[in-house]
Image (cartoon, rainbow, N blue to C red):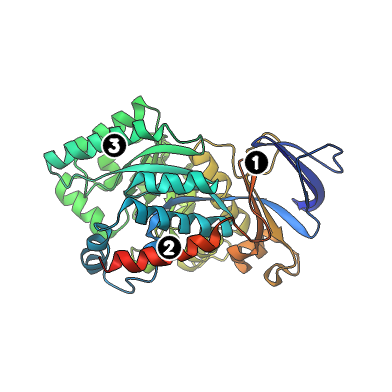
Amino acid sequence: MSILIKNIRLNGSVSDIYILGNKIEKIEKNIQIQADTIIDGSGKAAIPTFVNGHTHNAMTLFRGFAEDMRLEEWLNEKIWPHEAKLTEQDVYWGSRLGVLEMIKSGTTLFNDMYWHFHGTARAVEEMGIRAVLSAVLIDNFDPLAAQDARKNAEDLYEASKQYSSRIQFSMGPHAIYTVSADTLKWAKAFADQNNLPFHIHLSETEVEVNNAINNFGFRPVEYLEHLGILDENVIIAHGLWLSDHDIELLAKRKVKVVHNPNSNLKLASGYKFRYQELRDAGVCVALGTDGCSSSNNLDMLEAMKVASLLQKAWRYAPTSLPVDEAMQLGTENGGKMFGLKLGKIEEGYLADINLIDLSDPTLVPLHNLNANLVYSAGGGCIDTVICDGKVIMENRHVDGEEEIIKNAQETAMTWIKR
Ligand SMILES: [Zn+2]
């Protein structure tokens, strides 16, 4: 399969892009070659697709369901009791809705942590995008629950081999306050044996840090260092409450950090994400939305804007997290985080490309495309999405979207009353 995109704006000039299989084969002016599909790129620009570094995709079903609440009430009264009633088929439709929203806002890879693994895996397979899907581990410090959680993770890993290379398996111990030290160490050993990422929520709130000091005698990052878990295959979601020593450890062990600005703001998790210190220490930082119960949407352009504005606000420095860096966090750094040649439009990179309609009012005039994308437009400016060398959205239409909207709506209404 091959695709030739003619006369497309790329990095400020106009050229052609030739895609062969799932890779970008050639970028040049006026390529003369036969291709299975030809796309007229005039009036459009090509940019890399976005990487959502941390989410709980099927939680689209919770969108607008529990708003403006204290964290404990929100979890205990709204999220956990209803989450327990979800079936794999509910998660499938919630995931299809999430994937639809991601495609429509230009994201082709997401890092997920949620129940009913196969519900999400099926949605990703069918809709043609990429995902890193975690087996969730929670034992609440109960040895019997730990046995079940481990067995479940092992079984899921074996079963995950049936899916295509667009799906990567990951170990997903939820957090240090829901998973015992033994299970954390077991999960890391299993990840190392099978060369898998290790994805965990860490240092999200001040309460988590204080409890870790009281219960374990360490701050959360120091605790994982003490357990021998930190290395370059560890991805931490949030990393909001970090000391200088925490940052030194993260840099030394090459741990990756995913910042989720909308979720942190909405749940009032504390707002001082130490982006500059992490970047200057050499830590790979990417961006995520977190689940739709705490960020309400999966729009990575919005996450880039909010991340940038937050840095400017708390540092009183308008030069903090400039647009080109915000774009890099949402694209290239996400690719690096998962070891994929993704997030750049260059020969040899995976063919994951967004085509932007430059006549969208939020993109006019065209002084600076990245500034227009990050500060002005939303995900709605994406016209065409290519993932793994296949067109998965054209003229803003995704195959089967009407059915997804109908079934996701029905699923949400029946599950909530169960
Ligand atoms: Zn999360």
Q: Is residue 154 in view?
A: yes
Q: Is residue 340 left or right of residue 115?
A: right
Residue that appears at 19% across and 41% down = 180
Q: Earlier in the sequence, mark 1 or mark 3?
A: 3
Identify the residue at horizontal 59%, vertical 55% (top origin).
399
**Residue 92 point in image, percent of width and height:** 40, 52
Q: How packed is label 3: few (under 14 Cα within 10 Å), some, or many (20 or more)? A: many
For mark 3, what is the residue? Answer: 153
- Tell me where residue 332 sits by quadrant: top right
User: Tag 3: residue type?
Assistant: Ala
Q: Is residue 140 left or right of residue 193?
A: left
SS state under label 3: helix
| Residue in the foreground of this view, choosing between 267 and 17 | 17
Q: Callout 2: few (<14), some (14-19), or many (20+) C-alpha neighbours within 10 Å?
A: many
Name the residue type under label 2: Ala
Q: Residue furthest top?
A: 193
Q: Which mark is residue 408?
A: 2
What residue sits 63% from the left and 68% below the top? 376
Q: Position of residue 417 (x, y in %)?
A: 27, 69
